[in-house]
Image (cartoon, helix red, strand yellow):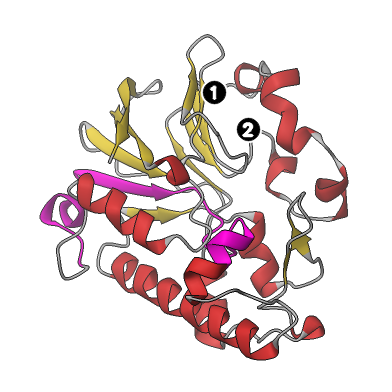
Amino acid sequence: MTDPSPRASSAGLRKFIVVGDVHADFAGLWGALRSAGCVTPGGQPTPPVRSGLYQVVLLGDLVHPKSQRAYDELLGAPYDRHNPEHQRQVAELQMAGLRAVRDYQAQAPGSVHIILGNHDDVLVQPQFVLGTGGGLRHTEFDPRHGGVVLPADLSAWVGTFLRELRVGQVQFAHVGPLPAHACYDEWFYSDPSSKRWFLDTPEYVELAGLAFGVYGHTQMERGIAVHEGHRFALADALHRREYLELMLDPGREDPLHNWRVVQF
């Protein structure tokens, strides 16, 4: 694992384009990046990304469609997770999406930051079977349940994902401001605070000494939610075709100048 708290370049004002949890919606991801001026028609980083003027932050959970309907759309037919051929096909489609993101990042490694989500973590450490409240289980990358093993090249790449990104006192993380929120163990999955901290204890951001925090993990049905009083944004809203832009000056302790929610 790389430095868990890397810091972006400190030279001048930068635009940070933040995309919430992908969950195999790679068409949505590329749509957001096209809207933000971050990707060329050929899938390469644009000059502002290559130069570092634009910084792209993906908040994690690149894999595992969020619903049965999303699996059906990915497969192009009704998906049966008990069918090994279906599992293989949806795994291969997601691996193609992962490789496209990896190749994009490789062309601008200092400007494209990927946070490790719990669904990404289970790709390389398949000790838990994740699912949804509706009973959907994500087993296409779990060989214990008929899934495929993630290839070594992709496993090594996922191993470089960040637990958090810090820009001065601004934090980007998958779940929340606490170190425990980025440790995907049995306690994490048994602790309801990972889905409720922003309701029950929003003061965590201030107590952590942060000027602002940007988080994913909990899908925002009404779109990106920004709580200026408690200084955080919940940006898991790709399904609503929204992403978050922040203007930050990495050279300042409190680097946040402004922000806006963008619909595409």
Q: Residue furthest bottom?
A: 85
Residue 197 x %, y %? 72, 27
Residue at left offset 47%, top offset 79%: 93
The residue at 64%/82% (across/down) is 87
Q: Residue at x 77, y 49 (%)?
A: 133
Q: Residues within 10 Å of mark 1 (few under 14, many from 20)?
A: some
Task: Locate the C terminus and report the quarter of the image it occupies.
Answer: top left
Which one is earlier in the sequence, the residue at label 1 or at label 2? Answer: 2
Three-letter amino acid code at the position of disc 1: Leu
> Where is residue 98 shown, x and y percent of the image?
44, 72
Name the residue rendered at 35%, 24% in the picture: 255
Side (left or right) of 178 relative to 33: right
Q: Is residue 161 left or right of residue 146?
A: left
Numbered badge on residue 21: none
Which quadrant of the structure image shows residue 218?
top right
Mark 1–mark 2 Cα distance, whole angstroms, equals 8 Å
Q: Amino acid at mark 2?
A: Pro
Q: Quadrant of the N terminus?
A: bottom right
In front: mark 1 or mark 2?
A: 2
Q: Quickly name the residue at label 1.
A: 210
Q: Can residue 52 be seen by looking at this rendering?
A: no
Asked if 239 appears above or below 152 in the picture, the reply is above
Q: Secondary structure at mark 2?
A: loop
The residue identified by callout 2 is 177
- Residue 65 percent coordinates (x, y): 57, 61
Label 1–label 2 contact, CB within 8 A? yes
**Residue 25 versus residue 125 in the image, above or below:** above
